[in-house]
Amino acid sequence: MSASRYSLKHHARDEQRILEVCCASAECAIAADAGGGDRIELCENLEVGGVTPSGDLLKEVKAGTSLQVFVLIRCRAGNFQFTENEISRMVEQIEKMRQLGADGIVCGALAGEGEIDGEATSRFITAAGALPFTFHRAFDDLHDQLAGLARLRALGVERILSSTGLRKACEDPQRLKQLAVHAGQRPVILACGGIRSTNIGALAAIREIREFHSAARSGGDGVDVAEVRAMKDAIISGS
């Protein structure tokens, strides 16, 4: 990825505040759209943390909503240390999703204990082509998150999905603020970790945090339209 492409892509959106809704079905995606969400992270099998969705699901979601769809690429549940065969498989999945109209890719890999697999991640970014690339919550397993952030910036990663390792981001919003301050304009810190309308206020009050990620559930298994709307209102109120 060239430095010029990295610095200019989506420049006009830099100051916008975004709610990304994690969806594992077309019904959830439609609910996210109806509630005023800004973007979808599409996956399947949320009960294991999410894996790569089918191409048919991506096509159905693209046809049924107006939102950008970032696709999670993860070939299996478990840790983020992948074999060569698994890495090659995920490269193929990224290329397929790009061809099917994905608006962004969410992926990543670790090498050893708590280190970024730079070679694998670089292959994923190359496969994504012009699509924006989010490094997922494998980031929270890093031993040195600030060094990891610098490494991912150098690789050309545009977003990092993180709760800084907390089960719920609202437990210590200042940790996310510090990470966001350190990141600056790139990579964008996409705050996650049990975010709901009942606790997003403390995060939304932090100006340095511009993007938020939530499954938007409220007692059920799927995305709740009212929950999406309430979180979006909280983000706007915190602007």
Image (cartoon, helix red, strand yellow):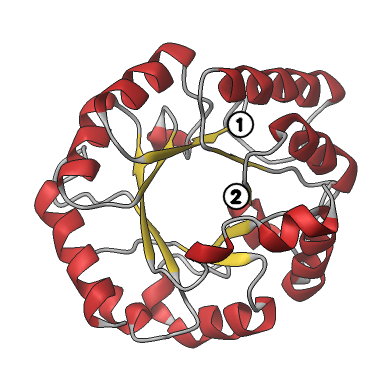
**Rendering coords of residue 96 (x, y %):** 62, 17
Image quarter for residue 47?
A: top left
Q: Label 2: how many residues lie within 10 Å, few (<14), some (14-19) or many (20+)? A: many
Q: Is residue 232 above or below residue 60?
A: below
Q: What residue does disc 1 label?
A: 74
Residue drawn at the location 26% of the way across and 79% of the way down: 201
Res 114 visible: no
Residue lying furthest right: 119
Q: Is residue 176 above or below residue 189?
A: below
Q: Quadrant of the C terminus?
A: bottom left
Residue drawn at the location 34% of the way across and 79% of the way down: 204
Q: Label 1: how many residues lie within 10 Å, few (<14), some (14-19) or many (20+)? A: many
Front one among 236 and 181: 236
Q: Marks 1 and 2: CB-CB under 8 Å?
A: yes
Q: Disc number at residue 136? A: 2
- Amino acid type at circle 2 is His
Say what secondary structure mark 2 lies in: loop
104 lies left or right of 143: left
Which of the two discs, 1 and 2, labels the residue nearer the N terminus? 1
**Rendering coords of residue 136 (x, y %):** 60, 50
Q: Disc number at residue 88? A: none
**Rendering coords of residue 133 (x, y %):** 64, 46
